[in-house]
Image (cartoon, rainbow, N blue to C red):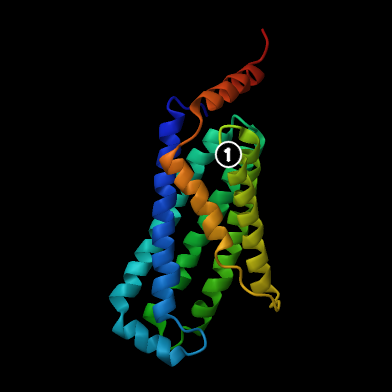
């Protein structure tokens, strides 16, 4: 996929990324943190009754996260195709899988609102299913990190931060799946992704270097006559 305005598209991806971050922090950390208590179902039920509208807003915010992940991933992977077509398409496949799993898991998010007091299973399953989706997203981050590191039109440090974020998603997921006695690593993924998102939004990319890579990419993909 060749782009006529790569810097503009990079900034658009940055907008999507920041919307994803804002909605994810609101839905997953604030709303669920205020209302859901995995170890106290009675308290959770009381919170859901008292703050049903807030919980619905959290659900909508989570839905926005899923929807925005797709165009964000499509743009980012499209920009990085000029570095390595196959890795970029593989990264796109992983973010599509992640978004699909996260969308399905929204059923576990909203179900407690309708099934209490028998909602222990979806309340507990949500974190496991969400972590499954994040393992796919972690692979996406790692692949994009490799491409960013090799791109020359993004700072290499952003690639390192994204690869670290991808590895951290896997560490956190395995900690949950295997019940490992290791602390949850909370902010590494946030800082790595937000550094990339802010660079996309504010700077975009080095358009001259991107066009140079794009020209070489086109030369390599056009078959000889």
Count all numbered tags in the image, as a single digit: 1
Which picture quadrant has residue 224?
top right
Q: What residue do we see at 58% from left, 45% from top?
A: 158
Up/down of 85 relative to 23, above or below: above
Residue 21 vs residue 154: left or right?
Answer: left
Q: Give how far across and how far down residue 221 sits, in percent.
A: 64, 21
Residue at numbered disc 1: 155
Q: Give how far across and how far down residue 205 sits, in percent.
A: 49, 34
Q: What residue do we see at 33% from left, 71% from top?
A: 56
Q: What residue do we see at 32% from left, 85% from top?
A: 49
Task: Count neighbours of disc 1 (C-alpha within 10 A) and say few if under 14, some if 14 to 19, many if 20 or more.
Answer: some
Q: What residue do we see at 47% from left, 48% from top?
A: 197
Relative to the observer, which residue lies in front, 10 or 67?
10
Up/down of 199 relative to 18, above or below: above
Residue that sits furthest to the bottom in the current view: 42
In the rendered image, the quadrant that contains the C terminus is top right
Viewer can see residue 216: yes
Up/down of 172 relative to 180, above or below: above
Residue 47 vs residue 87: left or right?
Answer: left
Viewer can see residue 111: no
Residue that sits furthest to the top in the current view: 225
Up/down of 86 relative to 134, above or below: above
Q: Give how far across and how far down residue 176 sits, in percent.
A: 64, 73
Residue 67 vs residue 188: left or right?
Answer: left
Q: Secondary structure at mark 1?
A: loop
């Amino acid at each position: 996929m060749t782009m006529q305005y790569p810097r503009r598209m990079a900034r658009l991806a940055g907008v999507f990324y920041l919307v994803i971050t804002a909605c994810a922090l609101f839905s997953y950390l604030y709303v669920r943190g205020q209302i859901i208590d995995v170890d106290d179902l009675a308290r959770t039920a009381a919170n859901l009754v008292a703050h049903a509208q807030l919980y619905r807003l959290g659900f909508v915010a989570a839905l926005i996260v899923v929807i925005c992940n797709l165009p964000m991933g499509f743009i980012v992977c499209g920009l990085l195709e000029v570095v390595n077509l196959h890795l970029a398409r593989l990264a796109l496949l992983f973010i599509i899988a992640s978004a699909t799993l996260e969308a399905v898991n929204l059923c576990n998010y909203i179900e407690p609102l309708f099934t209490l007091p028998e909602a222990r299973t979806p309340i507990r399953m949500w974190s496991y299913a969400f972590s499954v989706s994040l393992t796919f997203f972690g692979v996406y981050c790692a692949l994009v990190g490799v491409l960013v590191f090799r791109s020359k039109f993004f700072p290499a440090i952003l690639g390192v931060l994204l690869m670290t974020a991808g590895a951290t998603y896997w560490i956190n997921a395995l900690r949950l799946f295997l019940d490992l006695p290791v602390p949850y690593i909370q902010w590494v993924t946030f800082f790595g992704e937000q550094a990339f998102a802010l660079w996309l939004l504010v700077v975009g990319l080095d358009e001259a270097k991107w066009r140079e890579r794009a020209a070489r990419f086109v030369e390599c993909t056009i078959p000889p006559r």
